[in-house]
Amino acid sequence: MLTKRIVPCLDIKNGRTVKGVNFVNLIDAGDPVVLAKQYADLGADELVFLDIAATLENRGTTLDMVLKVAEQVNIPFTVGGGISSVEHVDKLLKCGADKVSINSSAVKRPDLINELAEKFGSQCVVVAIDAKKIDGEWFVHLAGGTIPTDIKLFEWAKEVEERGAGEILFTSMNHDGTKAGFANEALAHLSELLNIPIIASGGAGTIQHFADTFTKGKADAALAASVFHFGEIPILELKEELKKQNIPVRL
């Protein structure tokens, strides 16, 4: 059985790591390069960097930061935020990123998924989906959750897989920053529907929440931010507890 991955997420704004609740009220959480090295040393399996203002401010992800992170860490890392072209992805991968995450640009031009998968391989392409449950149905939102669409989560996820994405990063906007647990019902449905790995995001508050998203939500990886940034859940302690619950992790 494949090991389950623990993935700290660093939301970047103006070169700093920030954290909010339900995508707003951001507070400073430190230097992303320093944090990245700490997480690599503390046993994180992968890292995700999301330039959360890039799409809204209509600019690309900072190449300089990617270079610095690549020099400091020995674990795979994914970079996202404002990525909308093959050329941009080429630059990010050359700077040392292992994967890229696309979200709004994939919805606006779905062929981008095909193009990236064909050029760089599916393993490089993560499609992030921010969705909100409204009247019992999950709908995709764009630009850091600020723009609602009428696109349904499960239909979009299936299309993303068919177009060549290697992984899906699903964030429940209803759960984001609440520390009340992941959206396990939606995650389990995604897991049954798709054959590619699913990263759970939004709602981590306790060690048990991680255990539940791997067992009930059938997620392949679990992503979190504030519980790691502010030292509420040490990664090693988290992994040791998961192992005790017979959840396969890399220690």
Image (cartoon, helix red, strand yellow):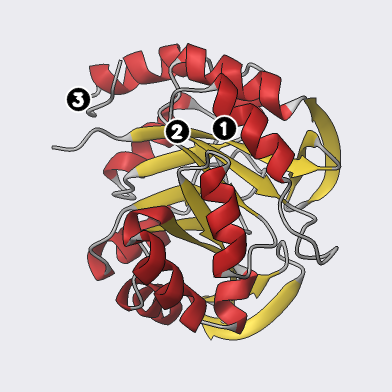
Q: Secondary structure at mark 3?
A: loop
The answer to which of marks 3 and 2 sits earlier in the sequence is 2
Of residues 110 and 86, the one nearer the viewer is 86
Query: Which quadrant holds residue 151?
Result: bottom right
Residue corresponding to mark 2: 46
Q: Which mark is residue 12?
A: none
Q: Is residue 38 left or right of residue 60?
A: left
The answer to which of marks 3 and 1 sits earlier in the sequence is 1
Query: Which quadrant holds residue 141?
Result: bottom right
Give the amino acid type for the residue marked by disc 3 in the picture. Asn
Residue corresponding to mark 3: 246
Q: Residues within 10 Å of mark 2 (few under 14, many from 20)?
A: many
Residue drawn at x 59%, y 53% as measured from the top left:
91
Q: Quadrant of the C terminus?
A: top left
Q: With respect to residue 16, does 186 lie above or below?
A: below
Q: Residues within 10 Å of mark 1 (few under 14, many from 20)?
A: many
Q: CA distance from mark 1 to mark 2?
A: 19 Å
The answer to which of marks 1 and 2 sits earlier in the sequence is 2
Residue farthest left in this picture: 1
Is there any visible trace of residue 135 in the rendered image?
no
Q: Residues within 10 Å of mark 3 (few under 14, many from 20)?
A: few
**Percent of width and height locating residue 47:** 52, 35
Is there any visible trace of residue 143 in the rendered image?
yes
Residue corresponding to mark 1: 205
Foreground mark, 1 or 2, reads 2
